[in-house]
Amino acid sequence: MNARLGAAFARQRLFTWGFFLTVFLIGLFITGDYGVSCDEPLDQATAAVNLKYVLSKICTPEFVNSFIPDCASVSDLSVWRDRDYGVVFHLPAYFIELALGATDPYDAYRVRHILNFLYCFFGLWCLYAAGKNLFSNGYGILLAVFFILSPRFFAESFYNGKDLVVAAFACMNLWTLSRLLTRDSLANVLLHALSAALLIDNRVIGLAFFATTLGIMAVKALLKRDYVRQGVHALVFAVAGALLVVAFFPYLWEDTLAHFAEVFGNMSVFRHDAEVLYQGEFYNDHHLPWNYIPVWVAVTTPLFILALFALGLAFFARDAGLKLWRRRFKELAVPLPLMLLFCFVVIFGSVLSVIALHSSLYNGWRQMYFIYPPMLFFAAHALWSLRQSRLSLLRTLCWAVTGAGSLWMFAVLILTHPVQNVYFNALALKPWTQYYDVDYWGSATHLAYEWMLKDQPLGEVNFCHESYIFKANRTGMRPEDRARMNKVTCDLADYRISNFFGRDQQDYLRLQQIKDTPAFKVSVLGQDILVVYKGPARTSGR
């Protein structure tokens, strides 16, 4: 029996290592397929400002000036517009770029994208480890598969150094919490404080995870009547977490309380001011409908995961309600119910706080991506709850839907490569470009540039942007390709690019009224998300 168990364990471990090695190798292989997002040049600039500040504290001025290119033109942190941005990813990434000599944008962005993938790969492993700790090894793999099969998260894992890195650290936070709930040691308290600090220092709304952890410790103390131990652990967690938040956020090193108040205050009423297209209507991002986040989650998440999430919530509510009704409090003080309570509070507390505070939100729900790993926990919980259920028909149906949904989403990842970030499910209104901001990162633009260079293999390529597209993708091209690109006004262009993303309402409407036949287009599941027209516009454009 022991030999058989040992062999089964060895096979399980081999499968797990094989799974993650396969994901790792595929990720490294396809990293170069993705474009550059519009935020990356800004993030790089913010990293340079912070690196200059940090190095000035520990190095000589001569070294700082020699290490950071054009250091004299780099702003001081105290007056930098985005000084309140966390740089846990961006600062190390920029340091590594410089250390490797990747000073040309083409090389620099590829280094950043590999690092972005590595951060997210680590988050994927953390999500698996959390599932393994609280369910089983198989369900840990299932959680990782769910994350991979979410197209927007898959694609943005390669270039979104803000929201996907936040999601990766949210996965880490779930893993460290699972360790703390299964083994209540001081070392696990400190490890969990580290993950909470990293999350906050990427995006300050990570305080939701920090505060909810303290709430879970209080609940555990009440249910187990273990007040002293939990009180000490809560104190250690709070103090260590606060110190680590400051340590990893250079702007907080001086005048800490005032600067943290500034960072926190900017969280809900951010300085971004733009129009967004939502359900076919135009809204200022400071005055969005209350259902903005729920609808975006609903139309961009794979349907089978949405169904499992809802079922997992129902099982959690049923089980917790029955235990409370029967006063079986100790059964709620075990790891899995506490983790699910944590996930429930993070998801709904964060969404409700954004609604209540009328927070300014960008395109889509990317600022709230950190709630997705907790959502996946409920999806896995739905299947876990059915493993020994008498509801055999429901169990069979759920696994059948999960299998079919997973196969379909795997096909979607392949069919939509490398623009999985614009995925919408069957609930979304069509055509997508008339109801939602689609390629708001502008990351698909490199596909248009690549086509134009092939279509005109020699000489200058005179092009313009019909839509609002940032130049990051052009900056990140190979130097020899970049040199051939010549941006002109649309009345002089040989090629005109549109990703249907406008500056304002009139701009959106103008883009929809262009009737020219595209010479090249990128479509996702039958929906055009990028087109290139040949020849100049009839009237002067961009």
Image (spheres, grey):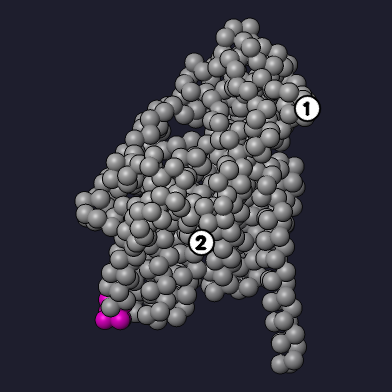
Above or below: residue 537 compared with residue 484: above
Task: Give the residue type that dot 2 points to.
Answer: Cys
The span picked out in magenta is 225-231
Q: What is the quadrant of residue 26 in the picture? A: bottom right
Q: Position of residue 42 (x, y in %)?
A: 46, 40
Disc 2 secondary structure class = helix
Q: Which residue is mark 2?
A: 171
Q: Which residue is mark 1?
A: 457
**Which residue is depicted at the point 34% across and 61% down?**
58
The foreground one among 251 and 499 is 251
**Which residue is depicted at the point 57% across and 55% down?**
100
One can see residue 160 in this view? yes
Number of the label disc, if any, that sits on residue 356: none
Above or below: residue 323 compared with residue 451: below
- Dot 2, how many residues are within 10 Å of its Cα: few (below 14), some (14-19), or many (20+)? many
* Dot in front, 2 or 1: 1
Q: Earlier in the sequence, mark 2 or mark 1?
A: 2
